[in-house]
Image: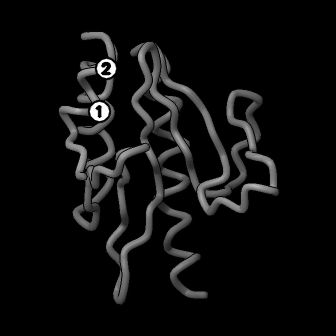
Amino acid sequence: MSISLDDHLQKTSPEIRKLYNDLHERICELGEDIEGPVSTKPYLGYKKILEKKRRNFVEVHIQKERIKLHLLPAEYNDPEIVKVAKKHKWTLDHTCFLSIEGQLDKRMGWIKQSYEKTKSLSRK
């Protein structure tokens, strides 16, 4: 069973839907090499298109009153972004939340770092 973007958005408030739409626009402005959102049951993925593959750089989990973001590891140096426990072995192992418009610029800075991190990972 596939799940659509509308399925993700129907479980949240109009404010969070607007915030997601603003987030989506800003993510797509990072570059022409972005594919997304790719809808899976738990999240919406945004991928950077590389030479021979595509790599997720942010997972967007739409929740009732906020948006949860999973990002690639980078030097974030901020207590608002938390590293997921190693036992999970996730590639996108840093998490933060977005619940109000005023947080969007800061979160986009982190998303941009994650997007740029895909360049270094593609060389491995």
Residue type pointed to by label 1:
His
What residue did someone put label 2 on?
A: 11
Task: Find numbered disc 1 in the image and state the secondary structure of the residue it sits on.
Answer: helix
Q: Quadrant of residue 54?
A: bottom left
The picture quadrant where one finds residue 74 is bottom right
How far across and down, in percent of the image, does residue 116 sit?
Answer: 50, 62
Q: CA distance from mark 1 to mark 2?
A: 6 Å
Q: Position of residue 84 (x, y in %)?
A: 74, 46
Q: 5 left or right of 115?
A: left
Q: Nearer the viewer, residue 39 or 75?
A: 39
Which residue is denoted by mark 1 in the rendering? 8
Viewport quadrant of the C terminus: bottom right
Does residue 103 sit above or below 121 in this rendering? above
59 left or right of 19?
Answer: right
Relative depth, front residue between 29 and 46: 46
Quick one: label 1, few (<14), some, or many (20+) residues within 10 Å? Answer: many
Which colouring convention does the figure follow?
one colour
Vertical placement of 87 versus 80: above or below?
below
Residue 103 percent location from the top left of the image: 49, 20
